[in-house]
Every structure is written in structure tokens, then in C-alpha cells.
Amino acid sequence: MQVGEVPVQNPAQNPVQNPMPDVPFKPGLEGVPAVQSKISHVDGQLGLLEYRGIPVEALAENSSFVEVCYLLIWGTLPTQTELDDFESEVRHHRRLKYRIRDMMKCFPERGHPMDALQSCAAALGLFYSRRALDDPEYIRAAVVRLLAKMPTMVATFSLMRKGHDWVMPRDDLSYAANFLYMLNEEEPSIEAARIFDACLILHAEHTINASTFSARVTASTLTDPYGVVASAVGTLAGPLHGGANEEVLEMLEYIGTADRIEAYVDQCIANRQKIMGFGHRVYKVKDPRAVILQKLACELFEKQGGDRFYDLAIKLEETVSDRLGGKGIYPNVDFYSGLIYQHLGIPADLFTPIFAVARLGGWLAHWKEQLGENRIFRPTQIYTGHHGLAYEPMAER
Ligand code: SDX
């Protein structure tokens, strides 16, 4: 052997070795506990979802999105004074730094709003660069800023990409009403604001989904909360996770009429193509959030004159459940949410940014919980590559 010569080993002599033989490899970490958490609980067989032990049905019926964020992040329902103080802080931090708006002027008009949101969330870290993760006041200030400013970011980009001026937030409106006001440039009805607020509650938290896992991995390195949120937004943007609600509308538009449903579903099955808005890694029954969103959609359409897609969606649900219910494929949270948002006048490419604004409550709760008992995420791997190969000179390749 020459000095420096690497012994060429035959990979066959190095069978794939799991460094932790008692921990089998699970693609996508399916079923593998990655964290311990007190924030929410899902029962995929019974179709249950609880936030801090409270069923999501009760919260959607009786609470508000701001109160639910308080519950998720600090672990208990607030007293009236605590809620008033928190709500007031959020109301009064909705404005954006003008430099963030100036940055948006450089974004391409055709850029996806999720990319704009991810950029703006990360940019907040430039303005609030002090890190004091052990200071409760720092934690609260970051929570307030992100919850307050994310809706403004979504609405501002939505208008500026059309060459319009942005709309300043209105401190006299509730969280949901102000968000809709900035999106549509008109004050929503009480009914529309209530339904939108319930939608935000239903999307706020869902145990260790992909974007929340991203948030926790990023949080575990002790970076700032703006980077944590930017990581999570980037993860949520994918169509297998948060991006499906936009694709559900495109699917319904493509199907067009009820007589085309069966052929569409059978073609998807034959081509092993996923049907958007259906299926879930945990729920093997209808997502409890889809049940509530369907009721909210009915309420909205009854009051505001029907919806051209609702009947089609019902028929599609029946057909998919009939064909794939045996495999536990039922509507998930994304199936009915887009119908509601479209009816509220929201463009389809803003559906996932709205999901991100809602899920911010859960991401911030998991960020805080991760900091409480942190250990940086660094899993292992099963190496399946080669060993000890020689470096081939260019002339021999
Ligand atoms: C959310 O994790 C969370 O909590 C996510 C979420 C949250 O609140 O954060 O709840 C948000 O639920 C949004 C999910 C939105 N995505 C979609 O609607 C896209 C379509 N759905 C699928 O991509 C899928 O159902 C997933 C990604 C949601 C779950 O996929 P899994 O658990 O990895 O399931 P799988 O791909 O292993 O599929 C298992 C079987 C397969 O069939 P076989 O190979 O066993 O024969 O079920 C089939 C799949 O083909 N299947 C579907 C299907 N989803 C699964 N078949 C048709 N259409 C589908 N939608």
C-alpha cells in the first residue's frame, strides 16, 4: 500500500448496517415519536383533536383565534384581563416596517405568496436581531410581533403584486375581521369574520406535522423565532402538506360537473395519483376539522347564496369515500377550507398563506416548548453508499 492510498473496499463486504438495530428505519419517520408535547392530541381512529386538552369543536364554537393562540402558547385559557392585554398588544403591532414593504416592491408580481411570506418572516429577524431566548419578555414580544404582522404581510403582498397601495391595518377590528379587511379592502360582515376566525382556529395546531417538525428542528439550534417561522412556512408550502387547499379548487374546476367525478377518481386510482384534500398520515376517518369546515361552509353558503362547487365537493367526497374509505382515505382539513375562502373573496394562492397565519399559533407554541427542554435534533442514518472508492483522474472518467 502506497502512503495515502485508500484501501478500496467492496461494498458487498459492508452490508447496510443500522447503527441502532433496535430502532428500525421508518420512511418519513412514520409512527416514530420525535418529541414529547403537551400542546395538542390527535386520535386518528376516533377522529379527535384537542388543543391543550380542549376538543377543537368546543374552541371553534366558543373561542377566538387570539384566545386559542394564548391557550396553545402559554398552556391555559387566559383570564379576561390576560386576554384583553394580549389582544391589545397584537392589535397595536400589526403595522410593518416600511423597509419590509420596500422589500416587497422588489418581489416579482408572479411570485407565490408563500415565498413572499417566508422571505418577510425571515426579514423580521433583521429588525429584531437581539436574541434573548431565556427572557420571557423577549419570547412574548416575538410572539406578539409575528402573530400581529404575518396577516399584514400576506395582505400587503397580495395588493402590491397588483400594483396597488397596501391597506393599513385597522386597530378597531378583531384579528379575523382586520385580516379580511386588509385582504378585500372592505370591512367583512360579522358572519364572515366569525366563520373566518373559526377557520383560523381549526388550522392553528396539529401535533408534529411536517411544518411543526421543521419549526422544532430549527428551534432546537437556538436560532431566532423569525428563522424558525421561515423554516415552517417553507415546509407548509408543499402540496402534500399545506398547499393542497389551493389544488382542491383547481381539481374541482377541472372536474367541472358531477358526471365526470367517477372517471376522474378512477383515473387517479389507476395512475396512483393522490386526490388533493383527501388522506392523512394519522386520521383514518374523516378529519374532524373537515367535519366542522363543512358545516361552516354550509352556514356561509346558506346566508350568502350558495356555491357552485359545494354540491360537486359533496359528490366527490361520497365517491372517494366509497372507493378508498377502506384504506382510510377521507377528507382532510384542506378539502372544504378552500370553498370557504373562495366564497370570502380570497384568491386561491392565498389559501396556504392563510393556513400559515393560523398555524403560526401552533409553531410558536412548539418553539416555546422546545426551548423549555431543548436538545438539538441530530438523528442518525443507515448508510447505503460505497466505501473507500479511488479518486478517478479526469482522463479516466
Ligand atoms: C393536512 O400531518 C398533518 O397533521 C398535516 C395536516 C396539518 O394540520 O398539519 O393535517 C395538514 O392534513 C394536509 C394534507 C393535505 N395534502 C393533501 O390533501 C394531499 C393528498 N394527500 C396525500 O398526499 C396523503 O394522504 C398525505 C400526504 C396527506 C398522507 O400521506 P401518507 O400518510 O404518506 O400516505 P401514503 O402516501 O403512504 O398513502 C398510503 C396509501 C397509498 O396507497 P397504497 O400504496 O397503500 O396502495 O393511501 C393512498 C396511497 O396511494 N393515498 C391516497 C391519498 N392519500 C393516500 N390515494 C389517493 N388520494 C390520496 N389523497
Image (spheres, helix red, strand yellow):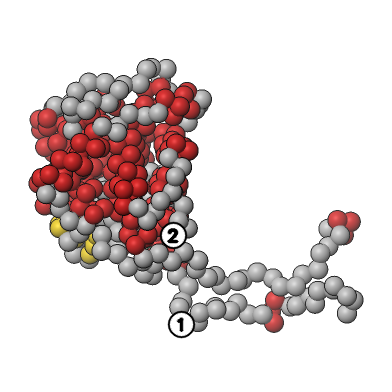
**Residue 354 in view of the camera:** no
x and y, in percent, of residue 95 in the image: 33, 29
Q: Secondary structure at mark 2?
A: loop
x and y, in percent, of residue 2 in the image: 90, 76
Which residue type carries mark 1? Asp
x and y, in percent, of residue 393 in the image: 86, 60
Q: Quadrant of the C terminus?
A: bottom right
Q: Is residue 363 above or below residue 149?
A: below
Q: Quadrant of residue 168?
A: top left
User: How many numbered badges does the structure rendering display?
Assistant: 2
On screen, residue 62 versus residue 321, left or right, reads left
For marks 2 and 1, the one nearer the N-term is 1
Q: Quadrant of ligand 1?
A: bottom left
- Residue 220 is tagged as 2
Q: Residue at x 36, y 60 (%)?
A: 370
Which residue type carries mark 2? Ser
Q: CA distance from mark 2 to mark 1?
A: 25 Å
Q: Residue at x 21, y 57 (%)?
A: 75
- Within-10-Å neighbours for mark 2: few <14, some 14–19, many 20+: some
x and y, in percent, of residue 375 in the image: 43, 66
For the residues carrying marks 2 and 1, which lies nearer the camera in this image?
Answer: 2
